[in-house]
Image (tube, grey):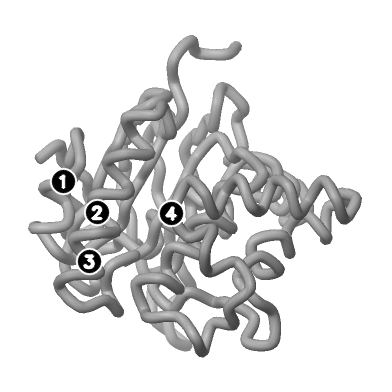
Amino acid sequence: MREAGTMIHMENISKSYPGRRGEPLLRVLDNVELHVARGDYAAIVGPSGSGKSTLMHLIGCLDAPTSGHYRLEGQDVAGFTAGELCRVRQEKIGFVFQGYQLLKKLNALENVAFPLLLRGVPLRRREQLAMEALEKVGLCARARHLPSQLSGGQQQRVAMARALCYSPSLLLCDEPTGALDQTSRDELLELLGELHEKGHTIVVITHDPCVAAHAVKRYRVEGGRVWKA
């Protein structure tokens, strides 16, 4: 059953990994409850080793939970196969990572359009969509520049445009400011706020409480549990 207005609904989510030989399973997440509505701007903050990276992988359908239910836009994906999770990622989630992950030999426009190429979108249409995405992040003038010709903040904006180009349901940002200087960090946080005002659903994973403070809703991960901050 589809839940009106709900983007992420996690219920009793646990994740364990095999221990070393002879050791018990390592439980990284323990009975997590997490609810994010459509249009929310949420931050998940926690120190290294808290379980936040594992939670990000589950939210982004990069991994499956050991137990519990995870409904993304009303679709229970907790028991999906790797192939089914891949399709969900392609259709519903735009990722922004700390390291940009741009292709060095492609210019900004080509990097943004690359996911559309993989989806079989015709050239003219994907260039149009990529330029529209670059416009959203204020980088149309840099469309023909290679990553090496862009600052760190500009490269992260290209990565943001790439995540937005196919209109995903969820924008999932993993430490998006981690590699940026103070000025670029402030500019990126301002951009996230603008995207939220335009109706995008955003989840930011961060170790930095100052970054989390810009979100409308905040959650803290510690010891494998999640609390509303």
Circle 2 residue: 189
Q: Quick one: label 4 or label 2, which is nearer the N terminus?
A: 4
Q: In which quarter of the image is residue 182?
A: bottom left
Circle 4 residue: 138
What residue sits 25% from the left and 69% below the top?
Answer: 184
SS type, badge 2: helix
The reply to whether dot 2 and dot 1 touch (C-beta < 8 Å) is yes
Query: Residue 185's mark?
Result: 3
What residue sits 54% from the left and 77% below the top?
Answer: 101
Q: Quick one: label 1 or label 3, which is nearer the N terminus?
A: 3
What amino acid type is highlighted by mark number 4? Answer: Gly
33 to the left or right of 104: left
- Comparing labels 2 and 1, the label whose residue is closer to the camera: 2
SS type, badge 4: loop
What amino acid type is highlighted by mark number 3? Answer: Arg
- Comparing labels 1 and 4, the label whose residue is closer to the camera: 4
Q: Can residue 161 be seen in this view?
A: yes
What amino acid type is highlighted by mark number 1? Answer: His
Q: In which quarter of the image is residue 82?
A: bottom right
Q: In which quarter of the image is residue 51?
A: bottom left
Closest to the observer, 129 or 71 = 129
Closest to the observer, 85 or 129 = 129
As measured in the structure, the alpha-carbon distance from the residue carrying label 4 to the one carrying label 2 is 14 Å
User: Above or below — where is 31 with respect to 212?
Assistant: above
SS type, badge 3: helix
Name the quadrant of the N terminus. top right
- Comparing labels 1 and 3, the label whose residue is closer to the camera: 3
Circle 1 residue: 214
- Comparing labels 4 and 3, the label whose residue is closer to the camera: 4
Mark 3 is surrounded, within 10 Å at the Cα level, by few (under 14), some (14 to 19) or many (20 or more) other residues, namely some
